[in-house]
Amino acid sequence: MAAKVGGAKGGKFSLNQNSDMNVTPFVDVMLVLLIIFMVSIPAATVSIKLDLPPAIPPPPGTKVKEPILINLQRGGAIFIGEAPTTLERLTGDLTLTLQRDEPNIPVTEQRVYIRGDRDVLYGEFMAVMNDLQGNGFYQVALINEEL
């Protein structure tokens, strides 16, 4: 805040307002904020070190097991792979399919994939999920496909 003294239009000792803005405090505050952000940003981007095993492809000639897919369609149509089933028969048919594919692993410990059409209602999807979890199938993965 400054005022001009003397030499103004209104008389010998007239004080006029200085209409120039003093930007020094503004620049000081901005520099302090810049320093604070420069110091705090690297601390916010802390990475977590993961020790993941290397990806090893299967040996040539080995057959890769196809996942068990439960396909949901609008209107309540349910398929295990290509075989149609109903909500009442879902766990029985799924158990038979999993026992046939991997007889040495308990069926409730095997992973099952669910893929739903775009038009499947949430209630129909949750009915299938609740039925699976109610019968001990907790290894359930959801498949999301980009259009």
Image: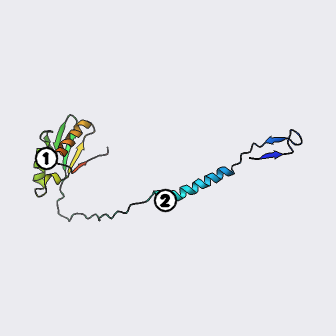
Q: Are marks 2 and 1 in contact (CB under 8 Å)?
A: no
SS for tag 2?
helix
Horizontal side of 2 relative to 67 (left or right) equals right
User: Left of 45 or right of it: where is 116?
Assistant: left
Report the front residue among 97 and 26. Answer: 26
Residue 108, how many percent across, how many down? 16, 51
Which residue occupies the foreground of this view, 1 or 20? 1
Task: Identify the amino acid type marked 1.
Answer: Leu
> Residue drawn at (20%, 34%), measured in percent from left and top?
75
Q: Is residue 101 visible?
A: yes
* 55 up-or-down from 134: above or below: below
Tag 1: Cα neighbours inside 10 Å, few (<14), some, or many (≥20)? Answer: many
Q: Position of residue 86 (x, y in %)?
A: 14, 38
The C terminus lies in quadrant: top left
Residue to which mark 2 is pinned: 42
Please name the amino acid that badge 2 sits on: Pro
Viewer-proximal residue among 12 and 65: 12
In x, y percent, where is residue 34?
Answer: 58, 55
Distance (Cα) linking label 2 and label 1: 50 Å
List the residue tagged with mark 1.
94
Element carrying mark 1: helix
At x 26% / y 37%, what residue is drawn? 122
Q: Which x, y percent locates residue 119? A: 27, 36
Q: Is residue 70 left or right of 28 when viewed as pictured?
A: left
Q: Nearer the viewer, residue 79 or 125?
A: 125
